[in-house]
């Protein structure tokens, strides 16, 4: 059984405990003034590192997601050149998307101007095989340097590889409008029109085995947020 204690014993026990506490605490417990505690200096804030190579976003590797057509995590590799030239075709042959930049056009993700992205539709896994079905209003997401850029599709263009004017319009700062100054960030997502050309009896190919026509989906940046 637990020992029983009568209520008469409680005051004496508590009084003894109080004496012991006061004796151990010394003058501080009796109300003696205490010196102020030293204040620790606040640590200096760490500098925020700049995104890698953000001095030239055109050279930044990104990833492309287009939920409406099942594209997810497609690597976009930048290179100096023009859409679907030899270096760009080599990138696409690996099953990746290519993003040209240079004197003849092309900007980085989220930048004002025309962000160009091209990939195969038929070969190398056909990452953009469903691109022709992308509708106005669908979203295209580009992730680069810790930021997700959302573009909204606004229209469709067709580019002819046999027309210098058409090629200039594709890579213009404002897609389809060579010489016009851009006021917003835009994107061109492009793939081949091989099935359509073949069905029309057009079997022309360039030196990189590209058909004459390409299907270009044009979009405008509508939002950005941390990834």
Image (spheres, rainbow, N blue to C red):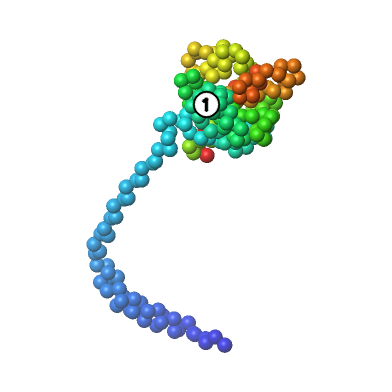
Where's residue 143, x and y in %? 54, 35
Tell me: residue 200, above or below residue 47: above
Quadrant of the frame with the N terminus: bottom right
- What is the crowding at mark 1: few (fewer than 14 residues within 10 Å), some, or many (at least 20)? many
Nearest to the observer: residue 39 or residue 193: 193
Q: Indicate left or right for 20 with 222 as reference.
A: left
Position in image of residue 152 (x %, y %)? 59, 26
Instruction: Indicate the position of residue 98 as horizontal and vertical percent values.
Output: 56, 30
* Residue 16 appears left or right of 211: left
Left or right of 49 in this view: 163: right
Callout 1: SS:
strand
Residue found at x 53% / y 22%: 82
For the residue pair 116 and 144, the one nearer the viewer reads as: 116
Q: Quadrant of residue 123?
A: top right
Position of residue 197 relative to residue 79, above or below, is: above
Q: Which residue is mark 1?
A: 100
Residue at 60 percent across and 31 percent down: it is: 92
Would you say residue 198 is visible in this rendering?
yes
Which image quadrant is residue 52 in? Answer: top left
| Quadrant of res 36 | bottom left
Q: State the count of labels.
A: 1
Q: Residue at x 73, y 20 (%)?
A: 198
Residue 148 visible to the viewer: no
Instruction: Determine the residue positioned at 69% across, 29% down.
Output: 122
Q: Is residue 21 above or below residue 215?
A: below
**x and y percent of residue 5 in the render?**
49, 85
Task: Point out the residue furthest to the front here.
Answer: 207
């Amino acid at each position: 059984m637990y020992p029983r204690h009568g209520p008469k014993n409680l005051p004496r026990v508590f009084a003894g405990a109080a004496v012991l506490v006061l004796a151990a605490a010394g003058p501080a417990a009796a109300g003696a003034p205490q010196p102020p505690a030293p204040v620790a200096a606040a640590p200096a804030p760490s500098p925020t590192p700049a995104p890698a190579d953000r001095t030239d976003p055109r050279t930044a590797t990104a990833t492309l997601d287009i939920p409406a057509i099942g594209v997810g995590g497609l690597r976009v590799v930048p290179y100096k050149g023009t859409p679907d030239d030899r270096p760009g075709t080599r990138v696409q042959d690996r099953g990746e998307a290519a993003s040209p930049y240079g004197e003849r056009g092309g900007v980085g993700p989220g930048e004002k101007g025309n962000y160009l992205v091209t990939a195969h539709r038929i070969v190398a896994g056909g990452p953009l095989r469903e691109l022709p079905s992308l509708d106005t209003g669908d979203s295209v997401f580009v992730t680069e340097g810790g930021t997700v850029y959302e573009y909204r599709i606004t229209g469709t263009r067709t580019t002819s590889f046999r027309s210098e004017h058409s090629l200039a319009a594709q890579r213009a700062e404002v897609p389809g409008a060579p010489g016009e100054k851009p006021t917003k960030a835009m994107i061109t997502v492009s793939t081949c029109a091989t099935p359509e050309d073949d069905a029309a009896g057009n079997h022309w190919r360039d030196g990189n085995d590209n058909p004459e026509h390409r299907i270009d989906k044009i979009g405008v940046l509508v939002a950005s947020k941390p990834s």
